[in-house]
């Protein structure tokens, strides 16, 4: 009589090694499954205890066969060279994680037309900005690729901000990440942190080995209870990947640097200490990284020196100081503080071109003829002596005709700067004057005034000479490398996206402004005409952000394509090495290629990698700076709940309008639901119309709003639109509640 064959494992109690083998086979048969010990035992139909199954799973994790996922669940770990097709036509790519708000991610892979979507459950423990290897497939019936992370190749950051919670025997830090993640910390590694404190944690083990099923780490800094301005600003920096403190070895190295300039060093440089030299900087500046000198030559020509702090004299390649500077790549300027790229010993002392002190510089010197045409230029190391430190306001006073020191020198420089500016615009430079919001803070860092920074001749004067130095340095290297390329750090800016330009032109046309977009050169002219018209028409001024979004992002690369926005064929960053590592690289590469006999070719692959890193750090710094401005704007308006302000309609969505307040540029949303009639939104989202009244409103139109709510945690402001007809408020009564019985959300036309 035949018997049905039983599985070897069914109903059996397996040895530890047998159990491991059968568990691994189970996961290999179901590579997408996520199982806990109870589920695995049930599928294998074994009688082993839950603890023995758990021990076998832990051993498979230790042997890197399985991956722990938290909540006691496990998944098969990708094995290079193994069968990972899982029944699909799969390939493997490498890219960078770009996390979405939902917790899913897109993997940006160089050379791939489409980013690869990865569901949150297939991210493993990859975080935003990490470099990963992914397995990719295109599901049947769909065109866009899907994928899963099989390995994290490079972590964007190790330090994270979170809230610490105490448990018996250990602590958990809940990170402020997308998606949220918990990190286990031994009680001996929490420093002086208490329950609920905001802390910085360094992840030391991403796999969750040992008794913890979460990644584990140690607390490196305790910030304290949430809510203070200081903690919020530090949080912005940490969440954007910036470390607050310098490593000890870096600080030690900076302290050992000598502040004395030896006679031997001066002998190697062009001595310009006797020439009239000064700096022009913001009121609160401490790191003066550029200075100007001017002298009239006997033949009527003018010599202008653009002197830049000689950071490379102090920072040598490959040192801890140099590696840390590259890692940071940029100083980060928040509303109330600066996180410097270099330790203060360098940024505010040794390298800073302070007045009445001899300082080492790297200089670009130009000779202008009587017609303000450049007839000669020189680059090299110098020693200078700044005679005067001007603030922008002080220099502006002199330029406006008030008496003061160096009035003739300042006015002559301003005359040359205006000529350079005129030539630049003539050659295709775009005038993108975006408003910069500034704050006046009290002694506790709270904002008591918000205003738009006014750019006057003193600001533009400095800007024009810095642009000149950057352009001429890049041109020198490019021309010297015409026959054989000299790898260099170029600052490039591509032409705008044609589809986005067409959309902008359509918006502008609906607002009464025609743009000629027939060629890149005509687009540049149209943008300049738009900027001029926007000075008189607030609606057009609100198109500026859209215009900027049509443009490619400027970035650093060794492959020069020119700078479209400036209209330059060659451009670099050379003038701010105290706060930008790109400029440090430019100084080094220029210095090695000066003179007829010098021809230095850097490793282009390595240099390009550094350029990409610096560009990425620049984007993070920009995001941190924007976050700090938004936080301070919300913090300021929080004190004005219930007050009425005048603003302009800056955006329109189905649910309401965005309004930007006059003078402060604070933006919030006013929902339609508070109005006494539904609003119809045009397809272009540039106009709305009352469903009953027929009254029409458009982008840029002046409106009045009442501040209803300010949410600091979400950086959001809610407003109430006060529509006025025949002198009577229609939107809401004096108590802030909507009048009338008719309420409705916006509806599309």
Image (cartoon, grey):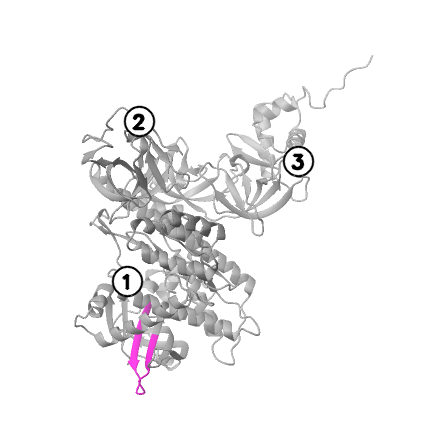
Are the residues at dot 1 and dot 3 in contact (C-beta closer than 8 Å)?
no
- For the N terminus, the image quarter is top right
| Image: magenta residue range | 287-305
Which percent across, then down, holds residue 290?
33, 68
In the image, taking residue 487 as reference, residue 366 lies left or right, namely left
Please tell me the numbered disc located at residue 743: 2
Lower position in the chain sequence, tag 2 or tag 1: 1
In the image, taking residue 243 as reference, residue 633 lies left or right, namely left
Q: Residues within 10 Å of mark 2 (few under 14, many from 20)?
A: some
Read off the residue under disc 3.
Answer: 86
Q: Residues within 10 Å of mark 1 (few under 14, many from 20)?
A: some
Label 2 – label 3 distance at C-alpha:
54 Å
Label 1 – label 3 distance at C-alpha:
60 Å
Using the image as rendered, state which of residue 496 and residue 101 is in the foreground: 496
Report helix, strand or loop for mark 2: loop
Lower position in the chain sequence, tag 2 or tag 3: 3
- For the C terminus, the image quarter is top left
Asked if residue 63 can be seen in this view, the reply is: yes
Residue for point 20% across, 68% down: 400
User: Vertically, is 319 above or below 746?
Assistant: below
Which percent across, then down, holds residue 403?
16, 72
Which percent across, then down, holds residue 591?
45, 74
Q: Residues within 10 Å of mark 3 (few under 14, many from 20)?
A: few
User: Vertically, is 497 above or below 651?
Assistant: below
Asked if residue 288 can be seen in this view, the reply is: no
Using the image as rendered, state which of residue 726 and residue 181 is in the foreground: 726
> Which image quadrant is residue 747 in?
top left
232 in the magenta segment: no
Which residue in the rendered view is the most extreme toward the right? 1
> Which image quadrant is residue 640 in?
top left
Which percent across, then down, holds residue 510?
38, 47
Read off the residue under disc 1.
Answer: 286
């Amino acid at each position: 009589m035949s018997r049905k064959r039983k599985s070897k494992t069914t109903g059996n109690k397996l040895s530890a090694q047998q159990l491991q083998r059968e568990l691994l086979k189970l996961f290999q048969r179901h590579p997408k499954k996520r199982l806990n010990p109870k589920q695995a035992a049930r599928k294998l139909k074994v009688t082993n205890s839950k603890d023995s199954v758990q021990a076998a799973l832990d051993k498979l994790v230790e042997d890197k066969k399985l991956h722990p996922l938290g909540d006691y669940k496990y998944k098969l770990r990708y094995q290079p060279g193994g069968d990972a097709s899982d029944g699909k036509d799969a390939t493997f790519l490498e890219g960078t994680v770009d996390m979405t708000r939902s917790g899913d991610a897109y993997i940006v892979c160089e050379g791939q037309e489409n980013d690869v979507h990865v569901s949150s459950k297939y991210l493993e423990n990859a975080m935003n900005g990490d470099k990963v290897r992914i397995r990719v497939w295109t599901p049947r019936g769909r065109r866009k690729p899907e994928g899963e992370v099989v390995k994290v190749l490079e972590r964007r950051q190790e330090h994270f901000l979170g809230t610490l919670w105490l448990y018996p025997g250990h602590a958990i830090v809940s990170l402020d990440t997308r998606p949220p993640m918990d990190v286990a910390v031994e009680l001996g590694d929490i420093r002086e942190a208490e329950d609920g404190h905001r802390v910085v944690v360094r992840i030391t083990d991403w796999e969750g080995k040992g008794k913890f099923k979460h990644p584990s780490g140690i607390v490196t800094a305790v910030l304290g209870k949430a809510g203070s301005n200081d903690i919020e600003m530090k949080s912005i920096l940490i969440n954007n990947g910036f470390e607050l403190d310098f490593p000890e070895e870096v600080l030690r190295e900076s302290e050992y640097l000598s502040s004395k300039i030896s006679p031997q060093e001066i002998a190697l440089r062009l001595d310009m200490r006797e020439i009239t030299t000064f700096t022009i900087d913001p009121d609160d500046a401490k790191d003066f990284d550029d200075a100007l000198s001017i002298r009239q030559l006997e033949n009527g020509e003018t010599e202008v020196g653009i002197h830049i702090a000689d950071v490379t004299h102090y920072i040598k390649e490959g040192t801890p100081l140099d590696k840390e500077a590259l890692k940071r790549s940029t100083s980060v300027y928040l509303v109330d503080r600066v996180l410097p790229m270099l330790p203060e010993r360098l940024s505010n002392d040794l390298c800073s071109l302070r007045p009445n002190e001899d300082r080492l510089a790297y200089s670009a010197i130009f000779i202008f003829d009587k017609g303000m045409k450049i007839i000669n230029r020189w680059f090299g190391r110098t020693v200078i002596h700044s005679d005067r430190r001007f603030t922008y306001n002080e220099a502006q006073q002199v330029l406006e005709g008030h008496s003061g020191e160096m009035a003739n020198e300042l006015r002559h420089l301003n005359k040359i700067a205006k000529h350079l500016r005129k030539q630049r615009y003539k050659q295709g430079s775009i005038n993108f004057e975006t408003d910069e919001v500034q704050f006046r803070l009290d002694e506790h860092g709270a904002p008591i005034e918000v205003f738009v920074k006014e750019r006057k001749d003193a600001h533009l004067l400095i800007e024009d000479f810095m642009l000149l130095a950057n352009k001429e340095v890049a041109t020198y290297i490019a021309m010297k490398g015409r026959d054989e390329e000299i790898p260099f750090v170029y600052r490039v800016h591509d032409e705008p996206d044609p589809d986005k330009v067409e959309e902008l032109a359509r918006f502008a046309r609906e607002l009464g402004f025609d743009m000629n977009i027939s060629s890149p050169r005509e687009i540049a002219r149209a943008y300049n005409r738009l900027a001029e018209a926007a000075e008189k028409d607030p609606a057009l001024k609100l198109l500026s952000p859209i215009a900027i979004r049509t443009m490619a992002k400027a970035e650093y690369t060794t492959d020069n394509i020119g700078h479209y926005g400036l209209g330059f064929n060659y451009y670099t960053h050379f003038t701010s090495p105290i706060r930008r590592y790109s400029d440090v690289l430019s100084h080094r590469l220029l210095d090695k290629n000066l003179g007829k006999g010098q021809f230095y070719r850097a490793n282009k692959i390595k240099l390009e990698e550094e350029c990409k890193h610096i560009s990425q750090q620049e984007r993070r710094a920009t995001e941190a700076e924007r976050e700090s401005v938004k936080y301070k704007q919300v913090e300021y308006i929080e004190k004005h709940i219930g007050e009425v302000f005048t603003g302009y309609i800056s955006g329109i969505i189905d649910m309401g309008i965005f309004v930007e307040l006059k003078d402060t540029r604070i933006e919030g949303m006013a929902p339609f639901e508070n109005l006494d009639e539904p609003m119809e939104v045009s397809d272009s989202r540039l106009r709305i119309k009352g469903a009953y009244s027929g009254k029409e409103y458009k982008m840029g139109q002046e409106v009045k709003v009442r501040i209803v709510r300010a949410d600091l945690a979400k950086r959001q402001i809610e407003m109430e639109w006060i529509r006025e007809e025949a002198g009577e408020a229609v939107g809401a009564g004096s108590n802030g509640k909507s009048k009338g019985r008719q309420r409705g959300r916006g509806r599309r036309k």
